[in-house]
């Protein structure tokens, strides 16, 4: 069983307890404006171009199968991204001696992925850590995730998943309970606002949260990306708190907006839509944290 990943981050301490290896899977049904992993949105492999490493040698043009490398005025190389997105060989990456080009997206077998992470098990055991699946949306590759999860469970590796909540319940319901913890994104309750900022409504996301809470609400931590101008107001946070109380979810994780992923958009040839938005002030995050604690939630900021 194969899946597609775009990064393996070792020695992570922000994606669950202890020292963890976070595996980022390709493909996401949402297109959040503030997404810090835009290379995880499309399921297809994509070309990363780091212009600061480029010496304009022209090898990418020579090796390109799609004639996607052009000169646009004084700009060289320039990549015709629609043609790049059709590519399956990425010979330009192989021929780039300065590592200015990278293919974001690797097909990997579940067993091979397990072999990559198992040497870190000694750190998992000593620190109480393990594996966290992230993305993209990992549960949009359910068969692959199930196979990998079974391998981890055979050696009692602690496993967690970070999900945007938009996945097919019927394809995940038989194994989702096997995760030790679930970080479940809730961005806002208002359906129209959610659709405007993420490209999708949240009706199925809320339904999936209900379904999960009926299995085991103790495993769920609701993650909230706190984005100025979108959901940092009191009403939105009160609405989320009321939903969690109703579902007996007791843990909240606040993720303050940052623009650290902006350079990735440039490397993918995409426009960053949040350029004018400033990072949220620390005192506002503290106020939101206090609000949830006043509701008797266990709340942490990452």
Image (tube, rainbow, N blue to C red):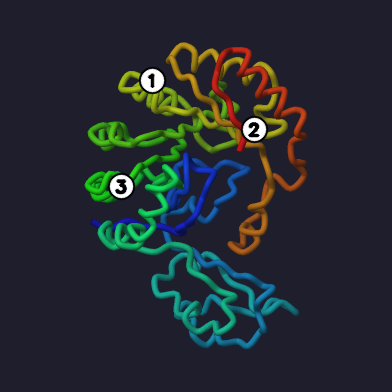
How many discs appear?
A: 3
Front-most of 130 and 214? Answer: 130
The quarter holding residue 266 reads: bottom right
On screen, 67 above or below 259? below
The quarter holding residue 119 reads: bottom left
Position of the N terminus by quadrant: bottom left
| Horizontal side, residue 62 vs residue 111: left or right | right
Q: Residues within 10 Å of mark 2 (few under 14, many from 20)?
A: many
What residue is shown with label 2?
226
Q: Position of residue 301 (x, y in %)?
A: 62, 33
| Horizontal side, residue 214 vs residue 245: left or right | left
Query: Spatial distance from mark 3 to mark 1, Cα to Cα?
Result: 22 Å
C-beta proximity under 8 Å, tags 2 and 1: no
On screen, 244 above or below 69? above
C-beta proximity under 8 Å, tags 3 and 1: no
Q: Residue at x 52, y 67 (%)?
A: 47
Q: Residue at x 63, y 53 (%)?
A: 261
Comes first in the chain, label 2 or label 3? 3
| Horizontal side, residue 92 vs residue 288: left or right | left
What residue is shown with label 1?
210
């Amino acid at each position: 069983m194969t899946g597609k990943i775009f990064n393996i981050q070792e020695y992570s301490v922000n994606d669950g307890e202890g020292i963890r290896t976070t595996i980022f899977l390709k493909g996401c049904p949402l297109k959040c404006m503030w997404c810090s992993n835009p290379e995880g949105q499309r399921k297809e492999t994509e070309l990363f171009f780091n212009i600061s490493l480029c010496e304009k040698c022209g090898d990418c043009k020579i090796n390109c199968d799609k004639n996607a490398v052009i000169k646009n005025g004084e700009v060289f190389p320039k990549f015709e991204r629609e043609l790049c997105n059709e590519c399956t060989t990425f010979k330009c990456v192989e021929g780039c001696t300065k590592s200015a080009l990278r293919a974001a997206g690797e097909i990997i077998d579940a067993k091979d992925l397990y072999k990559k992470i198992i040497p870190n098990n000694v750190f998992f055991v000593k620190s109480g850590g393990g594996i966290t699946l992230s993305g993209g949306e990992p549960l949009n590759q359910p068969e692959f995730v199930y196979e990998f999860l079974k391998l981890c469970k055979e050696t009692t590796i602690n496993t967690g998943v970070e999900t945007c909540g938009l996945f097919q319940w019927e394809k995940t319901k038989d194994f989702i309970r096997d995760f030790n913890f679930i970080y479940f994104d809730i961005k806002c309750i208002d359906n129209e606002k959610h659709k405007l900022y993420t490209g999708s409504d949240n009706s199925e996301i809320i339904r999936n949260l209900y379904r999960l809470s009926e299995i085991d609400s103790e495993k769920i931590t609701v993650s909230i990306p706190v984005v100025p101008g979108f959901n940092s107001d009191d009403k939105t946070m009160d609405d989320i708190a009321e939903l969690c109380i109703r579902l007996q979810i007791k843990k909240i994780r606040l993720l303050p907006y940052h623009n650290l992923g902006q350079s990735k958009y440039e490397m993918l040839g995409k426009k960053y839509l949040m350029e004018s938005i400033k990072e949220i002030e620390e005192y506002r995050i503290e106020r939101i944290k206090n609000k949830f604690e006043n509701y008797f939630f266990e709340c942490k900021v990452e």
